Image: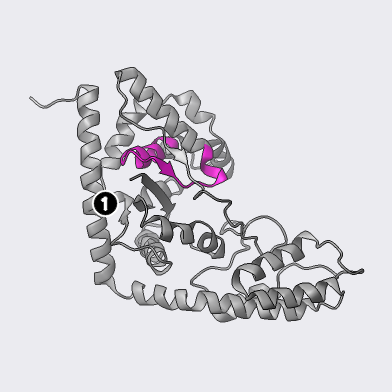
Amino acid sequence: METVVSGIRSTGMLHLGNYFGALRNFTKMQHDAKCFFFIADYHSLTTHPDPTILHGNVKNILSEYLAAGLDPEAATIYVQSDVPQVAELSLLLSMHAYVGELERTTSFKDKIRKQPQNVNAGLLCYPVLMAADILLHRADKVPVGKDQEQHLEMTRVFARRFNSIYGVEFFPESQPYNFGQELVKIPGLDGSGKMGKSEGNGIFLSESDASIRKKVMRAVSDSGPTEPNQPMSEPIANLFTLLKVVSSPDTVEYFTDKYNACEIRYGDLKKQLAEDIIATVAPIRERIEEIKSNDKYLHDVVMAGAERARASADETIRAVREIMGIKKF
């Protein structure tokens, strides 16, 4: 059985793009592979988050993961900082990670532009910590977005380098995983690009009905088609993409016909889209609130997950120490 590792920063919030993209595939994959899903609170420290809200962020994202369908009985779900072995492996891997290659990473260059007053060593060593997250469980596959592909390539570099230096075939070269299909790309409401938190164009799983309606009604559109079967502009194509993932085929067909006949009213389209998004999100939002209020359940989930993750990590750390010559008297 293949091992799969995936993480999410504790400052994240799950939106429709996450849900219809990776998360729905995670819920299927967790029954077919050995899955480790973790909340990356160590990674979030590179931006110096407010310590008074860090734990609350972890709790929120954990509740959203579970509400969206991750099963702690099927997959190992844990908080990164509950598994101290990840820090040790990150340190050991850093002995063979070179400053020049770390400074050349796109993410490091982007971060030092965005936070020039906070260029810390954690930012520089981010790829090493990410590699430790993956190699700690000797993952075969890693679901990653475009922005993380370079980090995954560096993970393979670190694995190859370790194996070469010590003359072993210990770490696998973890491969990117797209679930064997083209992922659904959920667009944002700003008329272009994909849905995301930083872009400010998303609808989140914990969002209220009123907020969803307001956002959808303000979504970018155009002045409407001027001739039958006119190609859709990007903002309108985006609205129809959203419609296809949350609405019935009959609804999609109705508005498509109206568009092609130059009879479409975007206000009606948006109202229908908002209600169909609400029908999708509301049950998940209720489940999020239910889970979030159950501290014992959350405690039990992360404690059980940490125990399984530490057991896996211990095997790796013991082997790495022996390979590197770190032995007890």
Callout count: 1
Q: In this view, does 31 lie above or below 317?
A: below
Categorize mark 1 by other alpha carbons within 10 Å: few (<14), some (14-19), many (20+): some
Q: Does the magenta stretch include residue 144?
A: yes
Q: Is residue 269 above or below residue 193?
A: below
Q: Find the magenta span and give its range.
A: 127-149
Residue depicted at x 32% and y 54%: 79
Q: Nearer the viewer, residue 181 or 37?
A: 181
231 displayed left or right of 131: right
Could you tell me which secondary element the residue under label 1 belongs to? helix
Q: Is residue 134 magenta?
A: yes
Residue 296: x %, y % from top left: 24, 71
Residue depicted at x 85% and y 78%: 263
Q: Is residue 115 visible?
A: no
Q: Is residue 280 above or below residue 119?
A: below
Residue depicted at x 46% and y 78%: 283
Identified by mark 1, the residue type is: Asp
Residue 325: x %, y % from top left: 20, 21
Q: Identify residue for label 1.
A: 82
Residue 5: x %, y % from top left: 38, 47
Residue sitting at the far right = 227
Residue 277: x %, y % from top left: 59, 75
Q: Quadrant of the C terminus?
A: top left
Q: Is residue 26 visible?
A: yes
Tell me the quarter of the picture where residue 248 sits. bottom right
Residue depicted at x 79% and y 74%: 257
Tell me the quarter of the picture where residue 276 sits. bottom right
